[in-house]
Amino acid sequence: IFDTGSFELLVRSTRCSHCVHPTTPYDRNHSKTYGENGTLTKHVFGSGPCVSMKGYEEVNVGPLKSKGQSFWEIIDHKIQVLDTAKFAAIVGIGPNFAYGNQDTTLLMNFGVKEFSICLQRASGADGVLTWGQEVPTDYKEKNYARARVIGKHHWVTRMHNVSFGKSPLTDNFANVPCTGGGCAAIIDSGTSLIAAPAQALQQLSTQLEPIMEDCSNMHLLPTLHFNIDGTDFTL
C-alpha cells in the first residue's frame, strides 16, 4: 500500500515467525542484494503499532530502481488488517525525511517530485498510482484544485468550515468545526477513513439525525461539506 501519511518502507517478513502471512513475506535469505543493519524501532499507524528491523535492499517499482534503499522488516505487530491484507508492504511516500531520520526516502531516491493517486468509488475497485508528471501544467491550472502544503513532515494543508449544512456559517456557528483559522488536515492515502478530534466529531454529530446501528438509514444522511485551502468539496 502506498501511504502518503508515512515515510519509510516496511515489509512483512519471515523474521516474524508467529505472524499470519496471507501473501508471501520478504525473506532476506533469498536476496543477493540485502544489506544488514539490525536497528530496531517502533512504527505506529492509525491501525496499530509494529516493531521493525532496519536493513538495506534494492527496490524496484516498474522502471524505477533504488539500490541500497533503507527499509524495515516487520518482526512483530498489532495491526489486524495485516493478517488478512493482500498487500505485503507499506510504502511511505511522505514529502520529507521521517521525523528524526535522515535516511533518504524512496521518493527521493527515485527522483520523483510529482505523483498522483486515484481511488475509485466502487468497493474493491482498482486504484491507480502515477509516478511523475503526466498532466500538462496548463490543464492542471484549469481543472485541478491546488492546496498549499503547510506541514514540515506530512502532506498537511488547511481545512475550513466542515458541516452537513449547505451554508455552514449561517447555521449554529458553535457546531461547525474548523471555523476561524481552520484546522490542519493530513492527506493520507493509507486509510479510507476521515479521522478527526473527538470535539470536532461531537460538533458534527449535533447536525445529524440518529444513525441506525445497522446503517439502514445511511441513504438518508446529508452531504458533508468542507473547504480545503480555499476550494469547496462535498462527500
Image (tube, grey):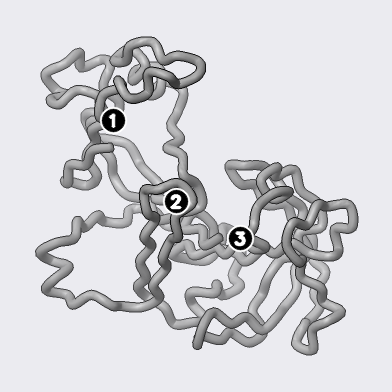
User: Could you tell me which quadrant the N terminus lies in?
Assistant: bottom right
Does 82 sit above or below residue 208?
below
Point out residue 162 in the picture as x, y percentages from the top left corner.
Answer: 27, 30
Q: Earlier in the sequence, mark 1 or mark 3?
A: 3
The amino acid marked with disc number 2 is Asp
Does 182 sit above or below residue 136?
above
The amino acid marked with disc number 1 is Cys
Q: For the residue carrying disc 3, how many other residues have a C-alpha within 10 Å: few (<14), some (14-19), or many (20+)?
A: some
| Displayed quadrant of residue 134 | bottom left
| 76 sits to left or right of 190 | right
Point out residue 163 in the picture as x, y percentages from the top left corner.
Answer: 25, 26
Point out residue 150 in the picture as x, y percentages from the top left corner.
Answer: 33, 53
Q: Earlier in the sequence, mark 3 or mark 2?
A: 3
Q: For the residue carrying disc 2, how many other residues have a C-alpha within 10 Å: few (<14), some (14-19), or many (20+)?
A: some
Kindly report the distance in space between the C-alpha atoms of the residues bearing marks 3 and 2. Answer: 13 Å
Q: Which residue is mark 3?
A: 90
Q: Which residue is mark 1?
A: 178
**Which numbered disc covers residue 188?**
2
